[in-house]
Protein backbone atom coordinates (compact mmCIF):
# COMPACT_ATOMS: atom_id res chain seq x y z
CA UNK A 1 0.00 0.00 0.00
CA UNK A 2 1.54 3.34 -1.02
CA UNK A 3 2.27 5.90 1.63
CA UNK A 4 -0.27 8.59 1.89
CA UNK A 5 1.05 12.08 2.25
CA UNK A 6 -0.85 14.01 4.83
CA UNK A 7 -0.73 17.67 3.99
CA UNK A 8 -0.97 20.33 6.63
CA UNK A 9 -4.36 21.38 5.26
CA UNK A 10 -5.78 17.93 5.97
CA UNK A 11 -4.64 17.80 9.61
CA UNK A 12 -7.38 18.22 12.17
CA UNK A 13 -7.34 21.55 14.03
CA UNK A 14 -6.50 19.89 17.37
CA UNK A 15 -3.41 18.22 15.89
CA UNK A 16 -2.32 21.49 14.28
CA UNK A 17 -2.73 23.29 17.61
CA UNK A 18 -0.70 20.58 19.32
CA UNK A 19 2.09 20.78 16.74
CA UNK A 20 2.18 24.55 17.06
CA UNK A 21 2.39 24.36 20.85
CA UNK A 22 5.24 21.83 20.69
CA UNK A 23 7.09 23.97 18.15
CA UNK A 24 6.70 27.06 20.29
CA UNK A 25 7.93 25.21 23.37
CA UNK A 26 10.90 23.80 21.47
CA UNK A 27 11.89 27.10 19.90
CA UNK A 28 11.40 29.20 23.01
CA UNK A 29 13.58 26.80 25.01
CA UNK A 30 16.46 27.22 22.58
CA UNK A 31 18.42 29.57 24.79
CA UNK A 32 21.44 27.99 26.41
CA UNK A 33 23.31 28.19 29.73
CA UNK A 34 27.07 27.76 29.65
CA UNK A 35 27.86 29.22 33.07
CA UNK A 36 26.28 29.05 36.52
CA UNK A 37 23.75 31.57 37.76
CA UNK A 38 24.86 34.69 39.59
CA UNK A 39 24.97 34.06 43.35
CA UNK A 40 24.40 37.30 45.24
CA UNK A 41 25.31 35.93 48.69
CA UNK A 42 28.59 34.57 47.34
CA UNK A 43 29.43 37.83 45.58
CA UNK A 44 28.67 39.95 48.66
CA UNK A 45 30.68 37.48 50.76
CA UNK A 46 33.64 37.94 48.42
CA UNK A 47 33.36 41.73 48.63
CA UNK A 48 33.38 41.52 52.44
CA UNK A 49 36.25 38.98 52.47
CA UNK A 50 38.26 41.19 50.12
CA UNK A 51 38.11 44.05 52.60
CA UNK A 52 38.91 41.84 55.63
CA UNK A 53 41.77 39.96 53.97
CA UNK A 54 43.39 43.17 52.75
CA UNK A 55 43.04 44.69 56.23
CA UNK A 56 44.69 41.56 57.62
CA UNK A 57 47.62 41.93 55.19
CA UNK A 58 47.95 45.59 56.14
CA UNK A 59 48.32 44.51 59.79
CA UNK A 60 51.21 42.21 58.81
CA UNK A 61 53.02 44.81 56.71
CA UNK A 62 55.92 45.29 56.14
CA UNK A 63 57.08 42.07 57.89
CA UNK A 64 56.54 40.06 61.08
CA UNK A 65 58.63 38.57 63.89
CA UNK A 66 57.94 35.00 65.07
CA UNK A 67 58.06 36.06 68.71
CA UNK A 68 54.79 37.99 68.41
CA UNK A 69 52.93 35.53 66.14
CA UNK A 70 50.40 34.67 68.87
CA UNK A 71 49.01 38.22 68.61
CA UNK A 72 48.11 37.61 64.95
CA UNK A 73 46.63 34.11 65.31
CA UNK A 74 43.01 35.30 65.79
CA UNK A 75 43.21 37.57 62.75
CA UNK A 76 44.59 34.70 60.62
CA UNK A 77 41.90 32.33 61.90
CA UNK A 78 39.10 34.83 61.15
CA UNK A 79 40.07 35.37 57.53
CA UNK A 80 40.85 31.67 56.92
CA UNK A 81 37.42 30.76 58.34
CA UNK A 82 35.67 33.31 56.16
CA UNK A 83 37.45 32.16 53.00
CA UNK A 84 36.78 28.47 53.75
CA UNK A 85 33.08 29.23 54.33
CA UNK A 86 32.92 31.00 50.96
CA UNK A 87 34.63 28.01 49.32
CA UNK A 88 31.85 25.74 50.59
CA UNK A 89 29.25 28.19 49.28
CA UNK A 90 30.93 28.32 45.86
CA UNK A 91 31.20 24.52 45.69
CA UNK A 92 27.51 23.97 46.45
CA UNK A 93 26.22 26.21 43.66
CA UNK A 94 24.71 24.12 40.84
CA UNK A 95 26.72 24.16 37.61
CA UNK A 96 25.07 23.81 34.19
CA UNK A 97 25.56 20.58 32.29
CA UNK A 98 26.17 21.21 28.62
CA UNK A 99 27.83 19.22 25.83
CA UNK A 100 29.52 22.41 24.57
CA UNK A 101 31.30 22.89 27.92
CA UNK A 102 32.39 19.23 28.04
CA UNK A 103 33.71 19.36 24.46
CA UNK A 104 35.62 22.61 25.09
CA UNK A 105 37.21 21.31 28.30
CA UNK A 106 38.16 18.04 26.65
CA UNK A 107 39.72 19.81 23.64
CA UNK A 108 41.71 22.19 25.85
CA UNK A 109 42.86 19.44 28.20
CA UNK A 110 43.98 17.29 25.26
CA UNK A 111 46.06 20.25 24.04
CA UNK A 112 47.85 20.48 27.38
CA UNK A 113 45.84 23.27 29.03
CA UNK A 114 45.49 22.21 32.67
CA UNK A 115 41.89 22.67 33.75
CA UNK A 116 39.92 21.41 36.75
CA UNK A 117 36.70 19.41 36.17
CA UNK A 118 34.14 21.26 34.03
CA UNK A 119 31.70 21.41 36.94
CA UNK A 120 34.03 23.55 39.08
CA UNK A 121 33.75 27.34 38.86
CA UNK A 122 37.10 29.22 38.80
CA UNK A 123 36.12 31.00 42.02
CA UNK A 124 36.45 27.68 43.86
CA UNK A 125 40.10 27.28 42.80
CA UNK A 126 40.84 30.93 43.62
CA UNK A 127 39.34 30.62 47.10
CA UNK A 128 41.18 27.36 47.83
CA UNK A 129 44.43 29.10 46.80
CA UNK A 130 43.75 32.05 49.13
CA UNK A 131 43.09 29.67 52.01
CA UNK A 132 46.31 27.72 51.26
CA UNK A 133 48.36 30.94 51.23
CA UNK A 134 46.87 32.21 54.49
CA UNK A 135 47.51 28.88 56.23
CA UNK A 136 51.10 28.82 54.93
CA UNK A 137 51.70 32.40 56.09
CA UNK A 138 50.25 31.63 59.53
CA UNK A 139 52.70 28.74 59.88
CA UNK A 140 55.69 30.72 58.56
CA UNK A 141 54.79 33.60 60.89
CA UNK A 142 55.30 31.41 63.96
CA UNK A 143 58.25 29.44 62.54
CA UNK A 144 60.51 32.30 61.46
CA UNK A 145 58.48 35.44 60.88
CA UNK A 146 57.34 36.68 57.48
CA UNK A 147 59.97 38.59 55.48
CA UNK A 148 58.95 41.68 53.46
CA UNK A 149 59.38 40.00 50.07
CA UNK A 150 57.58 36.84 51.24
CA UNK A 151 54.70 38.99 52.44
CA UNK A 152 54.59 41.09 49.27
CA UNK A 153 54.78 37.96 47.09
CA UNK A 154 51.82 36.26 48.80
CA UNK A 155 49.80 39.44 49.19
CA UNK A 156 50.00 39.93 45.43
CA UNK A 157 48.95 36.30 44.97
CA UNK A 158 45.91 36.74 47.19
CA UNK A 159 45.00 40.03 45.49
CA UNK A 160 45.16 38.25 42.14
CA UNK A 161 42.96 35.38 43.35
CA UNK A 162 40.40 37.76 44.86
CA UNK A 163 40.34 39.74 41.61
CA UNK A 164 39.75 36.54 39.62
CA UNK A 165 36.86 35.43 41.80
CA UNK A 166 35.27 38.90 42.00
CA UNK A 167 35.61 39.42 38.24
CA UNK A 168 34.08 36.04 37.44
CA UNK A 169 31.22 36.31 39.93
CA UNK A 170 30.26 39.83 38.79
CA UNK A 171 30.50 38.70 35.14
CA UNK A 172 27.70 36.21 35.86
CA UNK A 173 25.18 39.07 36.10
CA UNK A 174 23.55 38.76 32.69
CA UNK B 1 11.16 39.43 6.03
CA UNK B 2 13.91 41.98 5.30
CA UNK B 3 16.97 39.72 5.11
CA UNK B 4 19.45 42.59 4.82
CA UNK B 5 18.06 44.33 7.89
CA UNK B 6 18.03 41.07 9.84
CA UNK B 7 21.63 40.27 8.87
CA UNK B 8 22.67 43.76 9.90
CA UNK B 9 20.89 43.40 13.24
CA UNK B 10 22.64 40.05 13.86
CA UNK B 11 26.02 41.60 13.03
CA UNK B 12 25.31 44.51 15.36
CA UNK B 13 24.36 42.06 18.13
CA UNK B 14 27.72 40.31 17.75
CA UNK B 15 29.63 43.59 17.75
CA UNK B 16 27.87 44.96 20.83
CA UNK B 17 28.05 41.76 22.90
CA UNK B 18 31.63 40.88 22.06
CA UNK B 19 33.02 44.43 22.25
CA UNK B 20 31.76 45.01 25.80
CA UNK B 21 33.08 41.71 27.10
CA UNK B 22 36.36 41.95 25.19
CA UNK B 23 37.15 45.20 27.03
CA UNK B 24 36.52 43.54 30.38
CA UNK B 25 38.65 40.51 29.47
CA UNK B 26 41.50 42.71 28.24
CA UNK B 27 41.57 44.81 31.42
CA UNK B 28 41.31 41.71 33.59
CA UNK B 29 44.13 39.92 31.75
CA UNK B 30 46.45 42.93 31.89
CA UNK B 31 45.92 43.30 35.63
CA UNK B 32 46.53 39.58 36.24
CA UNK B 33 49.70 39.48 34.12
CA UNK B 34 51.05 42.53 35.95
CA UNK B 35 50.37 40.75 39.26
CA UNK B 36 52.29 37.65 38.11
CA UNK B 37 55.20 39.82 36.97
CA UNK B 38 55.31 41.59 40.35
CA UNK B 39 55.15 38.26 42.16
CA UNK B 40 58.08 36.99 40.10
CA UNK B 41 60.05 40.08 41.10
CA UNK B 42 59.27 39.68 44.82
CA UNK B 43 60.16 36.00 44.68
CA UNK B 44 63.50 36.72 43.00
CA UNK B 45 64.32 39.48 45.50
CA UNK B 46 63.27 37.30 48.43
CA UNK B 47 65.45 34.40 47.25
CA UNK B 48 68.46 36.71 46.85
CA UNK B 49 67.91 38.11 50.37
CA UNK B 50 67.51 34.63 51.87
CA UNK B 51 63.86 35.12 52.90
CA UNK B 52 62.75 31.97 51.07
CA UNK B 53 64.41 28.73 52.21
CA UNK B 54 64.34 25.74 49.85
CA UNK B 55 60.94 24.46 50.96
CA UNK B 56 59.48 27.97 50.76
CA UNK B 57 60.89 28.43 47.26
CA UNK B 58 59.14 25.26 46.11
CA UNK B 59 55.89 26.31 47.82
CA UNK B 60 56.09 29.74 46.16
CA UNK B 61 56.66 28.22 42.71
CA UNK B 62 53.73 25.83 43.26
CA UNK B 63 51.54 28.77 44.30
CA UNK B 64 52.52 30.76 41.21
CA UNK B 65 51.88 27.75 38.97
CA UNK B 66 48.42 27.12 40.47
CA UNK B 67 47.61 30.84 40.16
CA UNK B 68 48.46 30.84 36.46
CA UNK B 69 46.31 27.71 35.98
CA UNK B 70 43.42 29.38 37.82
CA UNK B 71 43.87 32.50 35.66
CA UNK B 72 43.58 30.37 32.49
CA UNK B 73 40.54 28.61 33.95
CA UNK B 74 38.96 31.98 34.77
CA UNK B 75 39.60 33.24 31.22
CA UNK B 76 38.02 30.10 29.73
CA UNK B 77 35.03 30.48 32.06
CA UNK B 78 34.60 34.17 31.24
CA UNK B 79 34.73 33.32 27.54
CA UNK B 80 31.97 30.75 28.07
CA UNK B 81 29.79 33.45 29.63
CA UNK B 82 30.38 35.63 26.55
CA UNK B 83 29.58 32.70 24.23
CA UNK B 84 26.36 32.13 26.15
CA UNK B 85 25.38 35.80 25.95
CA UNK B 86 26.18 35.89 22.25
CA UNK B 87 24.22 32.73 21.41
CA UNK B 88 21.18 33.83 23.39
CA UNK B 89 21.28 37.35 21.96
CA UNK B 90 21.44 36.03 18.37
CA UNK B 91 18.63 33.55 18.99
CA UNK B 92 16.51 36.33 20.49
CA UNK B 93 16.94 38.50 17.38
CA UNK B 94 16.03 35.56 15.13
CA UNK B 95 12.98 34.62 17.17
CA UNK B 96 11.78 38.22 17.18
CA UNK B 97 12.15 38.40 13.39
CA UNK B 98 10.16 35.16 12.99
CA UNK B 99 7.59 36.47 15.49
CA UNK B 100 7.03 39.64 13.49
CA UNK B 101 6.11 37.59 10.41
CA UNK B 102 4.13 34.79 12.06
CA UNK B 103 2.59 36.73 14.92
CA UNK B 104 3.82 34.03 17.30
CA UNK B 105 5.75 35.24 20.32
CA UNK B 106 8.74 32.89 20.63
CA UNK B 107 10.78 34.74 23.25
Image (tube, coloured by chain):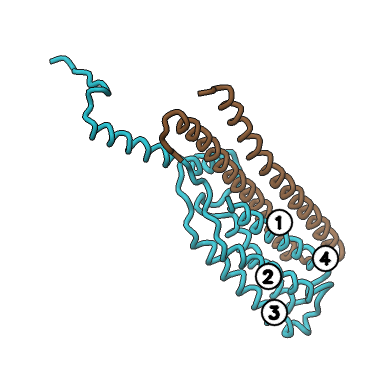
Chain colours: A cyan, B brown
Find residue A148 and report its horizontal and vertical position in percent: 83, 69
Find residue A139 and report its horizontal and vertical position in percent: 69, 75
Q: CA distance from mark 4 to mark 3?
A: 21 Å
Q: Which image quarter is the N terminus of chain A in?
A: top left
Q: Residues within 10 Å of mark 2 (few under 14, many from 20)?
A: many
Residue at numbered disc 4:
A149
Residue at numbered disc 1:
B64
Tag 4 and tag 2 share a subunit: yes
Find residue A83 and report its horizontal and vertical position in percent: 62, 69
Q: Report the front residue among B32 and A28.
A: A28
N-term mark: 3 or 2: 3
Answer with left or right where residue A48 lies relative to residue B3.
right
Tag 1 and tag 4 share a subunit: no
Which mark identifies residue A75?
Answer: 3
Taking the spot 66% from the left edge, 66% from the top edge, the residue there is A47
Taking the spot 52% from the left edge, 53% from the top edge, the residue there is A36
Tag 3 and tag 2 share a subunit: yes
Q: Are marks 1 and 2 in contact (CB under 8 Å)?
A: no
Tag 1 subunit? B
Q: CA distance from mark 3 to mark 2?
A: 11 Å
N-term mark: 4 or 3: 3
Q: Report the front residue among B95 and A65.
A: B95
Q: Residue furthest top?
A: A2
Q: Report the front residue among A95 and B52.
A: A95
Q: CA distance from mark 1 to mark 2?
A: 15 Å
Tag 4 subunit? A
Residue at numbered disc 2:
A134
Q: CA distance from mark 1 to mark 4?
A: 15 Å
N-term mark: 4 or 2: 2
Determine whether the residue tagged by mark 2 lies in a helix, strand or loop: helix
Amino acid sequence: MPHRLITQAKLPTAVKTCLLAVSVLFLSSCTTQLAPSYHNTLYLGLVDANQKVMTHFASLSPSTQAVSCHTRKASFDNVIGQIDALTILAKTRPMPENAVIDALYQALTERGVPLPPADEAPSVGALIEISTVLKDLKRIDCEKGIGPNVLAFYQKGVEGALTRSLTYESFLVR
Amino acid sequence: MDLNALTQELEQTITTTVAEDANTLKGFSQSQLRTFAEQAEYLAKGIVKGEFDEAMQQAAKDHLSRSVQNFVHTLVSLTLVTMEKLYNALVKVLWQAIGKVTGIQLV
